[in-house]
Amino acid sequence: MKIFAFLLTKLLLIILLTAFFPFSDTIAQTVETPVLEVVTVDHSDIKPILTWSVNEPSLITGYSIKRLIYEYPFVKPMSYQAIDTIYDPYIMTYKDETDVFGDAEPDQRLEKYFVVAFRIIDTDTFFNFSDKHQTMFLQSSNEYCEKRNKLIWNKYIGWADEFNKYEIYCKINSGTYSLIGSISSQTDTVFYHPNINPNSEYTYYIKALRSDAVESLSNESSVSSQLIDLPDFLNSDSLTVDINNSVHLFFELDINSDVDNYTLYKYNFKTSDYDSVMEHQGKDIRNIEFSDVNFEYNKINRYFLAGKDLCNDIVIVSDTMSNIFTEAEEANDEKKKNYIEWKDEQINSEYILYRCIDDYCSVIEHTYDDSYTDDIQDIFQNQFINETTSGRFCYFVESSDIGYLSRSNIACVNQEEVYFLANAFNPNSQIKENRTFKPKIAFVSDYTLIIYGNFGNKIFETNDPNTGWDGMLPDGSLAPRASYLYFISFKSANGIQVRKKSYINLVY
């Protein structure tokens, strides 16, 4: 009931004061105009404080404080309402702690006020009111990419030509406030605080100064400088060239960092600069792979991977990787030898040389040199003792002592096919080699041998170069002495199909 009575008294006074506003031109002369000196914000409790002045308080009954009400039940939005009344004319300061029309929130918005001085004589009330003043509402934000904080506030209204300057104050974390800048234009209400420290909290306020040193404070506004957890590492794992001469680059990422934009760069020999090739978004995969569709296996290609922050600035780079370019050919001065050489931008590397024959690869040399001559004489001789190969010799080089694995392209040499065809054989010979008809053949594939009978019928067929005809007929009997037509076909290492037919003499 007490609260209701208080509100009713306030409301009656508001109605009484409002009722006289239309006649202010005639009756205001009997009440001195109050001068609202300043509206400021008390940082201890975030409440607005008003200070005003009159020359002759003895001729005034009291003051009504009016605040702009943005929105409140049963109150016209954006209207000024009396929030309190002071009946002591010598009190000329007021802290807005009332909640009659809701709390003042100078840290959420600007608050506007004016003061009404009134005088009651008998049953008449006379009044006059000050100019309007408003608090400064400060907002701050972090602009990570510019490495600065931005402050923006509304201009202080109420001093007209008496405005002097704004002063900007700042404290970092739990430190003390210090002056970091000033602005002399009343309408210039934006300030940038550059070169901020990462992972710190900045708190600001604005001080508006009048020419006679009267000051108004804004609310305090805090902002934390954004910090990106940068990667601790970005490892180049391997650069490998596959059998199709396509390159595959593998990198290891720090998945605990905030960086999730990685760009692969490739050296451009025409411009002497690195060009962006492709990007990877995401940080949840520790190992990522890139494949360069424009890779040229027969020249050196250089790459590196860069991690970028939210501003697309490079914050970490991998080691530069380059491919090893390998070439192979028959040795010029000697038969049954292959010459392999490779080019690599790394120095003092140990290389592992691999030889591949019919899809089987094995290490044939460890060397610090950049070339090697492979003697395949033994392999050639073994062709005639049941170890026939296609004659295609392929080589690649690995280097893994440079911090990552580098595997070269595959370079191949095609050895010319070799074959010897007998014109007779004896199944009853005391020499085992002469008991079957089997061509001596080396470095071929897709082999076929067919023997035909006297009537053109097929009496023997094989696709195994190591299997010969022992003179037996399909029924298990020994074929009679005669000349038999044979057909032989095979493919050379160069992919040329060779077909031959002739006669073999079966003797006893």
Image (tube, rainbow, N blue to C red):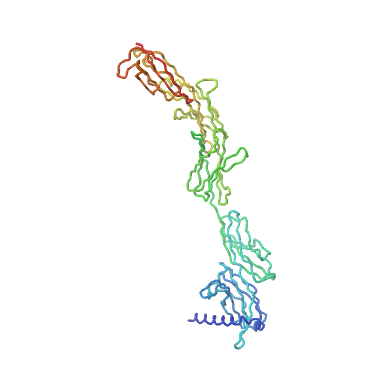
Q: Position of residue 32 (x, y in %)?
A: 66, 81
Q: Residue furthest front?
A: 455
- Residue 15 can be seen, yes or no: yes
In the depicted structure, whether residue 71 falls above or below residue 341: below
- Horizontally, residue 168 falls left or right of residue 355, namely right
Residue under the image location 61 percent in, 41 percent down: 273
Image quadrant of residue 110?
A: bottom right
| Residue at horizontal 50 percent and vertical 26 percent from the top | 413
Position of 474 relative to 232 (above/below): above
From the image, which quarter does the C terminus lie in?
Answer: top left
Q: How far across and how far down the image is residue 498, in percent? A: 45, 22
Percent from the top left, x then y, of residue 77? 55, 72
> Which residue lies at the image location 37% right of the left edge and 16% below the top edge?
436
Q: Between 160 and 474, which is closer to the camera in this rendering?
A: 474
Q: Position of residue 474 (x, y in %)?
A: 31, 19
Query: Residue lying farthest bottom?
Result: 122
Q: Is residue 14 left or right of residue 384?
A: right
On the image, which quarter does residue 131 sit in? bottom right
Residue 52 vertical placement versus 242 (above, below)? below
In-front residue for pair 451/209: 451
Q: How many labels, in total?
A: 0
Is 482 or 324 nearer to us in this picture? 482
Can you tell which quarter of the image residue 441 is in? top left
Would residue 58 be visible to someone looking at this image?
A: no
